[in-house]
Image: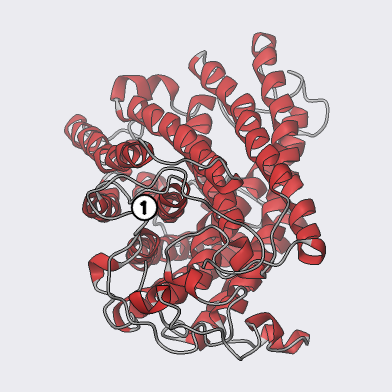
Amino acid sequence: MTTTAARSGDLPASSEPSYLGAGYTLGSWLGTTDHKRIAILYGISVTLFFFLGGIAVTIVRIELFTPEADVVTADTYNRLFTLHGVIMVWFFMIPSIPNIFGNFLLPLMIGAPDVAFPRLNLMSWYLNIGGAFLTVYALIAGGVDTGWTFYTPFSTMFSNTHVLATAAGVFLAGFSSIATGVNFIATTHMLRAPGMTWFRLPLFVWAIYATSIVMVLATPVLAITLILIAAERWLGLPIFDPSRGGDPVLFQHLFWFYSHPAVYIMVLPAMGVVSEVITCFARRRVFGYTFMVYAMIGIAGIGFFVWGHHMFVAGMSPYAGLIFSFLSFVVAVPSAIKVFNWTATLYRGQIGFDAPMLYALGFLGLFTIGGLTGLFLASIPVDVHVTDTYFVVAHFHYIVVGGTVSAFFAALHFWWPKITGRIYPETWARFAAILMFFGFNFTFFPQFIVGYLGMPRRYHVYPPEFQVYNVLSSAGAVILAAAYLMPLGYLAWSLVWGARAGRDPWDATGLEWQTDSPPPRENFPRTPNVEVGPYGYHPEGMSPAPNRPRHRGQGDRA
């Protein structure tokens, strides 16, 4: 997003200290209502939970290195993959991009001083933390062995683990998502700068807006489902117990009605990040901006109608299966539009292979593989064959880890100079991006093969003929872990020794790049006036200028 005022130098440097200098005590952080500081709080907590979930799956991969049970018992194995799933889904994947980068960037991108409800924003973080600590306590104190899906009747009638405490933690996290979604919707409607019309919004803002709608509409269904689990397990109500007239398949309908849209809570913000990064490093306007907007809205809407493809083997009507299969193919259309438009944006661009772009290109490849294998699962005959196998595990991880985590690191590297005011070592960052791409494929591609051959998921022993694939997958996980750990080192190094970043080290065009790095408490010295559309890297209808220079480090663009 550009403004004539900003480009002509009419947005002066702020005389206020940056948001990082607005207070140094613990109380100034824990009681802050500044959206940027709350984003940092989310960043710290999400990172901790990411590595906690990673430790659990590390033990899982060590166990699967051999066909026999050499490291943990079957019961412990069940608790480990449940810990991994619950922590990663609700306390990393769902809040990572919306709650960190959405919080930090949404007001900056629309020219606002803060979100619409700053205190509600802080409360959402405390709800998330409260839910996370309750869940972690339950999982560590004795664990839960139901898997992250809490399937009934096992979770309500047979499991003797801490199901209710874990469900209560996820319940609190759900209210955090609802509060965040309401806040972002209100912010986008009410606080846009003068001249910031709907079709002048950056695509990242559209992505956060669409995600917020899904959060607000879908998350209450999860809350109701968890209450029903508590009602049957604690109060003995016969909701899912078939022996007393209940229906265990009802739980699956309720759970997946939330959980498939939840995939888009993870993926839509990633799509917004990739749109911002690709257009910047290709030095080109986004190809088909309007179609990209409608594709995101389409994904958010159609995503509510495809939950049944998780239940093709649950005994549903053949006619219902046919409808859900068809809709699952339909939802792939707007996703394909986005992939084609990103590819067209790259065409004839002046592409720079900086670290954010490498992560974004990694997203493009991994998300495409995940999407194509999703079409396999949308086909009922194939789905029946591979249901509950490692093929499903690989597909899911290509979408939400290969896709969303790649976009998360793209966002982290792209906006790190804006968030911290420092430049990280580019060589190390590029190496980490490439290592992550290869490590991820090394880890999860063998799982497509072993899953198609028939290895079921969630088993800690398996036939010896599957060992070679599990050895490959476990070896790849070591590479992937190294790629995840490396940014901790060089980003921490940059906080002390990194060169100072100017306002716009990437020569980008968004409003967030027209304020200081790091931004002041009120974001802008005065409200910007938006006069043109987004992504003005070259005149509309013309090719980008050849070899347009980009710069890093101190100073601003002349």
Q: Nearer the viewer, residue 459 or 50?
A: 50
Q: Is residue 78 visible?
A: no
Direction from residue 201 to residue 96 in the image, left or right: right
Direction from residue 496 to residue 225 in the image, left or right: left
Q: Nearer the viewer, residue 502 or 100?
A: 502
Q: Residue 425 location in percent, x, y?
A: 73, 51
Q: Residue at x 72, y 89 (%)?
A: 23
Q: Residue 535 location in percent, x, y?
A: 35, 58
Q: Residue furthest top?
A: 465
Look at the numbered disc 1 and give the secondary structure of its residue: helix
Q: Quadrant of residue 22?
A: bottom right
Examine the rendered structure and indicate whether residue 391 appears above or below residue 139.
above
Direction from residue 214 to residue 327 in the image, left or right: left
Q: Is residue 436 visible?
A: yes
Q: Quadrant of the N terminus?
A: bottom left
Direction from residue 333 to residue 439 in the image, left or right: right
Residue at the disc numbered 1? 261
Q: Residue 460 location in percent, x, y?
A: 69, 28
Q: Residue at x 69, y 13 (%)?
A: 468
Q: Residue at x 37, y 28 (%)?
A: 372
